[in-house]
Image: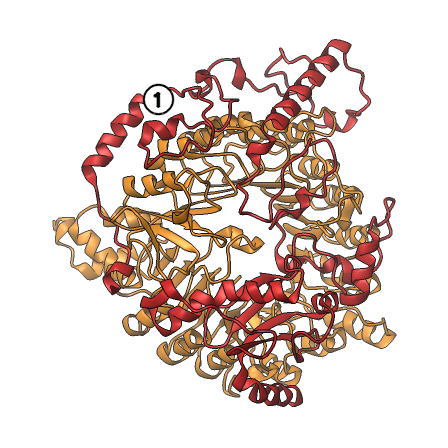
Chain colours: A orange, B red
Amino acid sequence: MASPLSFPEEVLEHIFSYLTLPSDLNSASLVCKSWYSADRYSRRKAFIGNCYSLSPQGLVSRFPNLRSVEIKGKPHFADFNLVPEGWGGYFFPWVRTMSVAYPWLEEIRLKRMVVSDEALELIGRSFPNFRVLVLAFCDGFSTDGLAAIAANCRHLRELDLRESEVEDSSGHWISRFPDSFTSLVSLNISCIASEVNFPALERLVSRCPNLRSLHLNRAVPIEHLPNLLRRAPQLVDFGTGTCSSEVHPDIYSNLVRAFAGCRGLRNLCGFWDVIPAYLPAVYSVCFGLTTLNLSYSTIPSPDLANLINQCPNLQRLWVLDYIEDSGLEAVASTCKDLQELRVFPSAPFIPEANVQLTEQGLVHVSLGCKKLQSVLYFCRQFSNAALVTIAQNRPNLTRFRLCIIEPHTPDYLTREPLDMGFGAIVQHCRDLRRLSLSGLLTDRVFEYIGTYAKKLEMLSVAFAGHTDAGLHHILSGCDRLRKLEIRDSPFGDRALLTNAAKLETMRSLWMSSCSVSFGACKLLSRMMPRLNVEVIDENDDPCSRPDNCMVEKLYIYRSLAGPRFDMPGFVWTVNEENSTMRSSSALPS
Amino acid sequence: MAAAIRNRVVVLSSPRRLLLNVLRKESLPRMDCDSRNGGGDAPSLPEYAAKERYCLFPRSSHWKAAKEDVLELTLCPPGENRGNHGRCRPSNSYLQFNPGNKTSAAEKGASRAATHHYSQDIERNAEYFAPPPPQPNTSAHNKPSQKRNAAAAAVGWPPVQSFRKNLASTGSTKQSVTQNVVSDKAVDWKKTTGLPPSPRGMFVKINMEGVPIGRKVDLLSCESYEKLAATVDELFRDLRAAQSDPSIVESAKPITGLLDGTGEYTLVYEDHEGDRVLIGDVPWKMFVATARRLHVLKRTNLSITNRESSNRQGA
């Protein structure tokens, strides 16, 4: 009987191709040298959570045969203007290296990276088998780059630009898809501000029989929808454009017929500026809907409730706070399969509430929707009692993000901090992986989190805590913590330095407007050479101030590649002479 | 010189071990109330540990995983008897819980005292909560029970992504019990720009010719054209110098003459129709209301740019 060690590599590689989880493959590669080698050559997918954690050359030498790459760049708080423009996250160095090393690359998925037109052109030129391009929350490119993709990627299946910022030079890039191009499965152009050449889009949709997912941009008026839908009745996922023009009976009846023809529709979104009178046009597909994203629609509550009452199979609902408590009661009684609820604020910057949305709405949903796992909820008041009730009702929560709009808001019933409520959440929801805190919170809540939230992977903290004990509890207690982002909380040097070793087990730590001194950053950097400690200061040179001055923003992440070379002038890191220097050389293209 | 620019971090193993030993001895926190501007030269770890900014420091018991009663969670709404743990309460009991529920006077007093304690703590530490002076965007925190507009001035709060921000202004008027509480200021803004007022600043993108990295500038914080020009100089001076020669970053030339046409560069803005207009002709407030994007262009290329933009609009 041949021992496993004498299997030829090809057999091992074939067996490994059945392992899909990267963690399984990582474990397999640690068994012995031949397994390491087999995994190395057979690995097809790579996920890089922080683009600066290793160099492109490092990736290419570790896994020489990748077909699919997913890379994330800027920290999450970049979405809220906390990371200055020019910080980094450039994709070009990656595509330059991969264009040589991975000629058979098929998929690129990026999040929060800066992608230039040259990078997109290089993709078009270098990868003959290219199939999937997803650019989520990216920026730095224009429609010229998209034209290059359209013209050159003959086998493109997915082009998804979700929430990216695209510079619009012209809407004609769509016409660059050749007439022979028929392989499109998914197209998401919802983020493009300007008009796209609609006839070209229609022709594209007509000749792609496998098109499953189409998200239009806001500029497409509702009159164009019926013709488009008639050409693609096989759609599963559809995003409308704007629905704001006056309701004409002809258009309305066309719309009704068109939607009725899309029997397989499961996801709906878009609905910009929608007039409530249009909504009944989609009633025919509502029964089959599993995802409904109305977060761009300023529809009032009764119309929303009417629509949602038609959707008993909804699993995911994104909506504005116009839904109000009454609408959420309707959700709780109708959508028994609901797994994810996101309620966004319609007017977050005015001081008083403009809608009747309180904690009651979420409590109703937590009671009625037994499969609820993921919550993102913006509101203006909450209470410990409500949090406790939600926690007891739904111990199966895995993601819980509560944003009480005014910082430091206490329990509105008792005026106490919300420590106990969030404590109940982490105690009951044992599988909680992601948590965002808000409201008035003391160090106590962090004790609870450190003690109970053993599976927590990502934590967001804002305007919370009193002393370093809070941060210490998180870093010492949360065993699985990968990402921690903190703003405007009085956490300082001691907790950070005491738990320095923990930082190497995490992907990244972001702290802004906290109380970490510059000297502590330098010390941490010297203690932990495999961490990149980056100090961001746009106003001043931290070297010119005494060491015990607080830093404005701090981003710490583990890295195999050492300090990066593409830092702009406002980012500092430590060099070997123990003084800091910014590095503004090697500006990327 | 180029080598000096690259940042290399040297692995220092023995000092690290020393440091870890020191940390182990430092397992109990010390109650020190040193002032935050202790000064002095490069302090070692024990001195960092000593520099406590807050006199309100937890007792040593708080550092250990709490086995005492501090961590026992009471699974009932505040105001009820906290002694009964593990009692299984019906899950819809909250829905019958009224804010006007009568709790005992003693419990009310206790909760009031607790609130008082917390507000006192926060007041006492209010100055420590505010970040250091150089930051223009954050605010000092007052009593939490008062509605504060100042706190709304924090950048990036509430955490709403930019593509979600301008929805309320474009939608139909909300018919609800609590009607829109939109201030007059909001109404004026709606008339001019169609966007809601943004108290935390109005960031517009700004690109400089010849520099691949764009920046963002907050128009609301620059109260005049002169301030804007100074901000542009700050943002781009080093980037531009680095473009030409990375080694002379330290002595970068300032960018001057943006407004009066005397410098190498000039400022141009794009309005909501996409037209590019020279800066300086309209009053500052009107400029802020209409500008969508800024460009810093070489003066010599201006006429070419005008031609390009009109070509684009014709296409």
- Quarter containing the C terminus of chain B: bottom right
Q: Nearer the viewer, residue B156 or B250?
A: B250
A328 relative to A37, above or below: above
The quarter of the rendered structure image containing the N terminus of chain B is bottom left
In depth, the one of B197 and A373 nearer the eye is B197
Q: How would you rate the neighbour count of disc 1 (Cα within 10 Å): few for under 14, some for 14-19, many for 20 or more? A: few
Q: Which residue is mark 1?
A: B27
**Residue at horizontal 79%, vertical 62%?**
B190
Total marks drawn? 1
Whether B217 is drawn above or below A26: the answer is below
Residue A451 percent location from the top left of the image? 47, 26
User: Given the image, on which type of amino acid does mark 1 rest?
Assistant: Ser
Q: Nearer the viewer, residue A472 or A339?
A: A472
Q: Residue at x 41, y 67 (%)?
A: B252
Residue at 44%, 46% (x, y): give it. A554
Does dot 1 land on a helix, a strand or a loop? loop
Taking the image as shown, residue B106 lies to the left or right of residue B270, namely right
Q: Does the image show residue B309? A: yes
Vertical placement of A438 versus A201: above or below?
above
Residue A200 x %, y %: 61, 84
* Residue B244 quadrant: bottom left
Instruction: Specify whether residue A588 is in view.
Output: no
Q: Position of residue A222 (x, y in %)?
A: 75, 73
Relative horizontal placement of residue A157, taking residue A268 as reference (left or right): left
Looking at the picture, how far across and down is residue A542, in whole percent?
Answer: 42, 48
Q: Quadrant of residue A326?
A: top right
Residue A370 is left or right of residue A499, and the answer is right
Q: Give the letter of the chain under mark 1.
A: B
Q: Give the side of residue B228 with respect to residue A360, left or right.
A: left
Residue drawn at x 42%, y 31% as measured from the top left? B38
